[in-house]
Image (tube, helix red, strand yellow):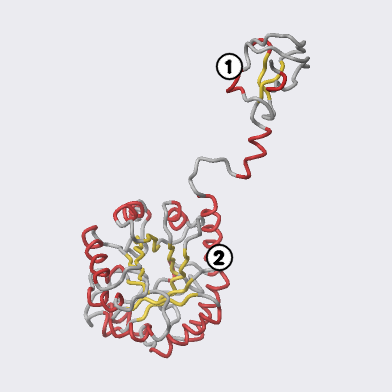
Amino acid sequence: MSRPLIIAEAGVHHGCDRQRGFALIEAAARAGADAIKFQTYRAERIVTCWAPRYWDCGEAPGTQFDTFLPRGRFGPDDYLALAEHCRRQGIMFLSTPFDIEVVDWLEQCGMAMYKIASADLTNYPLLKRVAVTGRPILLSTGASTGEEIKAAVDFIRQQGGHDLTLLHCCLAYPAPYDGLNLKKIITLRELFPDCRVGYSDHTIPDQCLSACLGAVALGAEVIEKHFTLDRSLPEDDHYHALDEQQLGQLVEGVAHLTAALGSGQLQPAGCEQPARLHARRSIVAARDLPAGTVLEWEHLDFKRPGHGIPPSQVADVTGRVLNRDLQRDQLVTWDCLQ
């Protein structure tokens, strides 16, 4: 089993500063992430000028438009520069488009795949524009019903989008643990066997990174987690993001957990072979036994190591005659039986 794809979700933490964007890319690459993902939007195309905020992360009173306006000033040349820097650093460049026109920008960047935000699961014009590119799609499913997810999957396939990964997500900032319902990962795998399933996390990270690792244990093949250079920065998603050190811990933890999950086959692991040989028991002589002894239970004992006949076969040994002397604790072997 290969480990899940790990995406560092940088969003707009570049602050519309290319050098900060480059620094995010370099930090994510050092931490071992497979991809870094940005968000591509323009305030006037994502929200009305009066839409209220629905989150609280210390921002001054205002609208969603007020939040998005200063963060949406990167243009196509900026995203192309980020994509080129990703290639230099050996990390995959991804971005979430939030309107149809910016998909054209991202197509110039050579996108490996597109991410669709949970809030746009019912935005069929955007789904169609992304699907017709023929590129793989990551579709977040936060705050969605099963019927909505199925309808979106069917629509994307009708438009030519057949390489699809569904990301379970709790669309709350931050997401409370009792709202995560990670078992939805199992449900999505059962309902959509032709899709990969992953997890996008919005929890404030705990020391164990338990939400992301729990998702991997349940079968997530993609893990997306918000990423920042400095978790203490005000506003935006910094407070529930991982920094470089934590992202490295996530990469390592996912690798260890993937190795630990294994194949599920009911066979001994290679590392268990010494214990299998030396800690299991064998049939041995309970005392010194002369040749000609007809073996009964009182002649036998069951001790380590497991180099001889296992106790499970004792019924095939009792009643047999020894063809040579055995000393106490000596293995009873098939070749010493008549």
Q: Position of residue 39 (x, y in %)?
A: 38, 78
* Residue lying at 53% horizontally and 63% vertically, measured from the top left: 251
* Residue lying at 59% horizontally and 21% vertically, measured from the top left: 313
Q: Dot 2: within a 10 Å radius of its alpha carbon, few (fewer than 14), some, or many (20 or more) residues?
A: some
What residue type is disc 2 on?
Gly
Whether residue 247 sits left or right of residue 169 in the image: it is right
In this figure, which residue is indicated by the disc labeled 2? Answer: 248
* Residue lying at 51% horizontally and 80% vertically, measured from the top left: 86
Q: Position of residue 224 (x, y in %)?
A: 43, 66
Image quadrant in which you'd find residue 94: bottom left
Whether residue 77 sits left or right of residue 145 in the image: it is right
Separation of marks 1 and 2 at Cα, in angstroms = 56 Å
Eyeballing the image, is 236 above or below 330?
A: below
Q: Position of residue 143 (x, y in %)?
A: 27, 62
In this figure, which residue is indicated by the disc labeled 1? Answer: 315
Comparing 218 with 118, the one in front is: 218
Front tag of 1 and 2:
1
Where disc 1 sits, the SS reads: helix
What residue type is disc 1 on?
Ala
Where disc 2 sits, the SS reads: helix
Eyeballing the image, is 48 above or below 276?
A: below
Label pair 1/2, CB-CB below 8 angstroms = no
